[in-house]
Image (cartoon, rainbow, N blue to C red):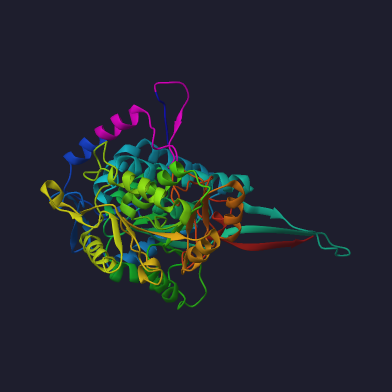
Amino acid sequence: MSDKPKGDGAFKLTYATMFDPPEELHTQFEAALRTQKAKLGGSYGMLIAGDEIHSSEQFEDRSPINQEWMLGKFQNGGEAEATRALEAARQATHLWSRTPWRERVATMRRVADRIDERVYELAAATALEVGKNRMEAVADVAEAAALIRYVCDQMEANEGFIRQMGTDPLKGYTAHNVSVLRPYGVWVVISPFNFPAALTAGPAGAALVGGNCVVMKPASDTPWTVRLLAECFLEGGLPKGAVNYVTGPGGTLGEALVKSPLVDGITFTGSFSVGIHIYRRFAHGKFPRPCILEMGGKNPSLVSRNADLSRAVSGILRSSFGLQGQKCSANSRIYVERPIYDQFVSKFVEATQAIKVGDPTERTVFMGPVINQKAYQDFKDYNEELSEGGQFLSGGHVLAEGELAKGFFCQPTIVSEVDPSHRLWKHEMFLPITMVHSIENLEQGMQLANDVSYGLTAGFYGSEEEAEWFFDRIEAGVSYANRPQGATTGAWPGFQPFGGWKGSGSSGKNAGGVHYLQLYLHEQIHTLIQ
């Protein structure tokens, strides 16, 4: 998404630039917010083969900002709806998989354009539904379009992944060997609540550009944003059944999608526990099938005695408390060399205590609510657990006075003096809680940083020579050094491809990068002898 500011040049929104947007962005967001608030409470069907489908039961989607705001009613789909959507996708593969790749790319570029045209509408819904501040919400939707365009670029750069191979030395014959990457067929995308636009559009866009047909299932906390996104896909001109949108619980609808023999591939983003269940359940099919998983992180940052502390505080704060710590890339572990530990902690605490918590649709608010009652209760429980031996440097409590009592608001929390053996150093809390620990040297810090089952993102602050050492040693799919815009967060397609090692991911290839689209395709060799 691009906006034209009043001055010279164009503003290109990414996670790195969103902290200084043009005034027009705020004006348009606020207009869209008024429009969306005026039509809260609507009823939304599933979208299967282009038709509006209703189930026998519905559920209410309420805002974590204020539980009195009923955003809409959505369908409580189950196995019947899963099968119907998968059959629609299977039927559509006969047309879409055989559509020339250049036509598929042109169609998906129109989808991205449509997302751009509706960016503020979708962002307003995302802010209300997820509790994101306005800049995070707009960035989420903008990234959805950017991810689609990036895979279109990759398909074009590789000329449809059609490659002439070597010629066999056959006496009396001429051999023509061609490698072609072709779609699998029907792809399921199960997306998380925290990035409902980007983490639905990214995998769905890659699957579709590759010629697969898609069934999208959002998290039950965020059906509205994904419904609006699904409309953009349909408005872009995809054939009937190429993209389908279903809603319902993971235990019924989600399980039906995962176990169905109609599914040729699946992408899931969410917790390790759910992801590994899907991985094992999906393996029970008749044939091996691709299963792309992004399963969270327990992301460290290391702060050297040679660090620029202003950069370190800025980046670590944004990564610890952006989206209320509800990012798989959130900075939840901070290791600081002892000579500058006290100075860093003092600056970090001061900056954290200046964070404004409240209605995230307001311009001056950085932190909104956590997503639901369970997360709210988890925040209380984790802080009670950390109070036994830990020292709270900031936060530690929920905010339940006045209007904040109607939502799920928590203080940004910093805890020190927690024993390195404590389980929460390795457990993903997914909340605005970060833990800080002093280290004698960077070797000790690296050992602690890598001593987890996850390997998603990591950050470093220090000299350039130390940064090279960090990149060589860290066990993470995304690593940043000396970045004030975010210590461990803020990946963008084409700049910082996003994916994890170890328990954080299954594919070894990062979304928004040069190797991702190929995950949605399999190879076929054509040999013609003349």
Residue 319 seen anywhere in this rendered image of the structure: no
Tell me where residue 338 appears, x and y as whole percent: 46, 56
Left/right placement of residue 65 relative to residue 101 reads left
- Tell me residue 342's x, y (percent): 40, 52
Q: Residue at x 30, y 68 (%)?
A: 389
View extreme (front): residue: 339
Name the residue nearer the viewer: 339 or 299.
Answer: 339
Decide: is 508 above or below 16: below
- 250 drawn magenta: no
Say which of 178 and 239 sits in front. 178
Find residue 117 and report its image quarter: top left
Give the image quarter of residue 433: bottom left
Does 413 sit left or right of 508 as displayed?
left
Query: Quarter of the image containing the C terminus?
Result: bottom right
Q: Position of residue 374 (x, y in %)?
A: 23, 64
Q: How many marks?
A: 0
Instruction: Provide residue 183's location: percent of width, then percent of height.
Output: 54, 59
Q: Which residues are magenta?
A: 6-31
Outermost residue, right side? 171
Residue furthest top in the image: 7
Q: Residue at the location (58% across, 48% down)? A: 155
Q: Nearer the viewer, residue 236 or 271?
A: 271
Left or right of 432 on screen, residue 243: right
Is residue 9 in the magenta section? yes
Residue 442, above or below 36? below
Which corner quadrant holds the N terminus? top left
**Between 104 and 26, which is closer to the camera in this rendering?**
26
Residue at 52% x, 74% y is 288
**Vertical side of 83 occupied by 45: above or below:** above
Is residue 198 at all visible to an observer of this figure? yes
